[in-house]
Image: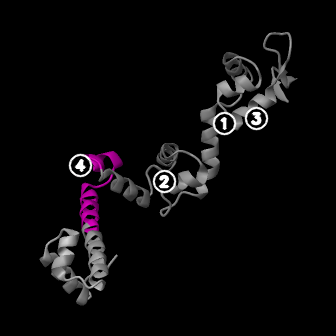
Amino acid sequence: MILYNSIQINTYNPNFSGNKVCINKIRQDLEAGKKISEIARTHNISERTVSYIREKFNLPNKKEIIKQKLNETLPAMVNETVSLKTLSEQTGFSIYAIKKWITEHLGSLPKIVKREKVLEALHTTKTNKEIAEELNIPLNSVKSLRYKHKEGNILRKKQECLKKILELKETGLSGRKIAKKLNIHNSTVCRLLKQYRNNELVPN
C-alpha cells in the first residue's frame, strides 16, 4: 500500500475507466532498473503515464535506485587492492558510476585505482602534466610510472626474445640462423644468451 494524501492507494486508473494499474508493480519494475518504455509496454500504458505515476506517488527514479544500491554495496568492497574493473565485474555497475561514487564519498580514488588509471592514460597521447592534473596526483609520480612501465615493457620483450632463441637453439640452429629467422642482429642473440648464462635474464 502507498499512502497518498492520507489515503491508502495501491492502484491507479489513468483514464478513470478500464483496467487499473498496480502502483506497487510499477515500483517493483522501477526498483528492478527497468526503463520507462519497458514498464509502459508491460502494463499497456503510455510512457507519459508511467512518468506521471512515478511523480504523483513519489516512486524512485532510476538514478535514485542506482545511487541507493551503490551506497549499500560499495562501502564494504572499496579498498586499496580492488580495481575499478573488478568492482564493476563483481557489482554489475559501470566503471563510471563506481568512480563517481568513490570520488564523492571518499574524496579521492584509492592508490591502486589511481595507478591503474595512470597506466591506462600512458597509452594515450596525453602528456605527463595532463595526466597528473586530470587524476590529481603529483607530476613526478606520473613520470616515475611512465619510466617503470617503459622499462618493464623492454624487459618483457627481451625475455620473450630469449625464449624464442632458446627454443630455436634446441633445434640445432646456429646463432646466425636464429638471428635471421627472428629478424634480429646476431649480436643481439649472443648478448641475450650471455645474459642468460650469467643468470642476468630469464625467458618469459
Residue 73 is situated, as x and y percent measured from the top left of the image, at: 63, 51
**Could one spot residue 93 in this view of the protein?**
yes
Q: Secondary structure at mark 2?
A: helix
User: Compared with residue 135, is residue 112 higher up or lower down, i.e. above or below?
Assistant: below
| Cα separation between marks 2 and 1 | 22 Å
Q: Is there a contact, CB below 8 Å, between mark 3 and mark 1?
A: no
The span picked out in magenta is 124-153
Give the total number of marks visible in the rendering: 4
Q: Nearer the viewer, mark 3 or mark 4?
A: 3
Q: As drawn, is 64 to the left or to the right of 135?
A: right
Residue 8 is situated, as x and y percent measured from the top left of the image, at: 87, 25
Query: Which of the marked residues, 3 or 1, is nearer the chain's N terminus?
Result: 3
Query: Which of the marked residues, 1 or 4, is nearer the chain's N terminus?
Result: 1
User: Compared with residue 126, is residue 159 higher up or lower down, i.e. above or below?
Assistant: below
Does the magenta stretch mainly form a helix, a strand or a loop? helix
- Residue occupied by mark 4: 129
Specify the amino acid type for callout 1: Gly
Numbered tag placed on residue 28 in the rendering = 3
Specify the amino acid type for callout 2: Leu
- Residue occupied by mark 2: 84
Query: Which of the marked residues, 2 or 1, is nearer the chain's N terminus?
Result: 1
Q: Is there a contact, CB below 8 Å, between mark 4 and mark 2?
A: no
Q: Residue at x 14, y 77 (%)?
A: 186
Q: As drawn, is 73 to the left or to the right of 135?
A: right
Q: Residue at x 29, y 50 (%)?
A: 132
- Residue occupied by mark 1: 33
Residue 57 is situated, as x and y percent measured from the top left of the image, at: 75, 23
Q: Quadrant of residue 169?
A: bottom left
